Image (tube, rainbow, N blue to C red):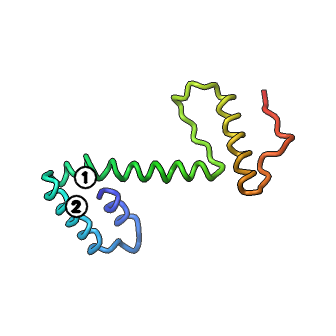
Amino acid sequence: MEEVEKKKKRLKKKPSDVNFEKLIQKAEEISKRVDMSLDEYINERFIPMQAAKRSKRYADYVDNSYVYYVDENDPRPIEEQIETFIEHCKKLDKKFGTKIINKNFKKSE
């Protein structure tokens, strides 16, 4: 809901209030059905479900693009992480028939 409010301020054409009201009304109906408050339902059920969907969509995006996510908590040395990314790019080159990584690519010291 906070995101919708931010978009209302940012966008020139505001989202339809009818759709937003329908969303709130539907969430209230579901929360009554599962015997929870609206806030409990949103925080305990709706957000985790949406987070799972978004993480799957993000994983699909990373798997099909030349994007590398750097995790600062990754214990592997940076050279190993770069090699992993290069291998990922080679697989994408084969999949899409492109030549981003060529045979002359050398790992710098």
Q: Within 10 Å of the Cα at label 1, are there few (<14), some (14-19), or many (20+) other Cα atoms?
A: some
Decide which of 14, 105 is in the foreground and name it: 105
Cα distance between the residues tagged 2 and 1: 8 Å
Q: Outermost residue toward the right?
A: 104
What residue is shown at x 67% (from left), y 29% (from top)?
A: 80
Instruction: Quadrant for residue 12, please give it.
Output: bottom left
The quadrant of the image that shows the C terminus is: top right
Q: Earlier in the sequence, mark 2 or mark 1?
A: 2
Estimate the x, y position of residue 24 in percent, counting from the top left: 22, 64
Circles 2 and 1 in contact, beta carbons < 8 Å: yes
Name the element at disc 2. helix
Vertical relation: 70 (above or below) 61: above
Estimate the x, y position of residue 31 in percent, counting from the top left: 17, 56
Vertical relation: 74 (above or below) 86: above
What residue is shown at x 30% (from left), y 56% (from top)?
A: 2
Estimate the x, y position of residue 10 in percent, counting from the top left: 40, 64
Residue under label 1: 42
Q: Name the residue type under label 2.
A: Ala
Q: Is residue 97 left or right of residue 75?
A: right
What residue is shown at x 18% (from left), y 54% (from top)?
A: 38
Decide which of 108, 105 is in the foreground and name it: 105
What residue is shown at x 27% (from left), y 49% (from top)?
A: 45
Q: Name the residue type under label 1.
A: Ile
Residue under label 2: 27
Name the element at disc 1. helix
Vertical relation: 106 (above or below) 92: above
Q: Which mark is residue 99?
A: none
Estimate the x, y position of residue 71 in percent, counting from the top left: 54, 34
Vertical relation: 100 (above or below) 24: above
Q: Within 10 Å of the Cα at label 2, are there few (<14), some (14-19), or many (20+) other Cα atoms?
A: some
Decide which of 14, 29 is in the foreground and name it: 29
The quadrant of the image that shows the N terminus is: bottom left
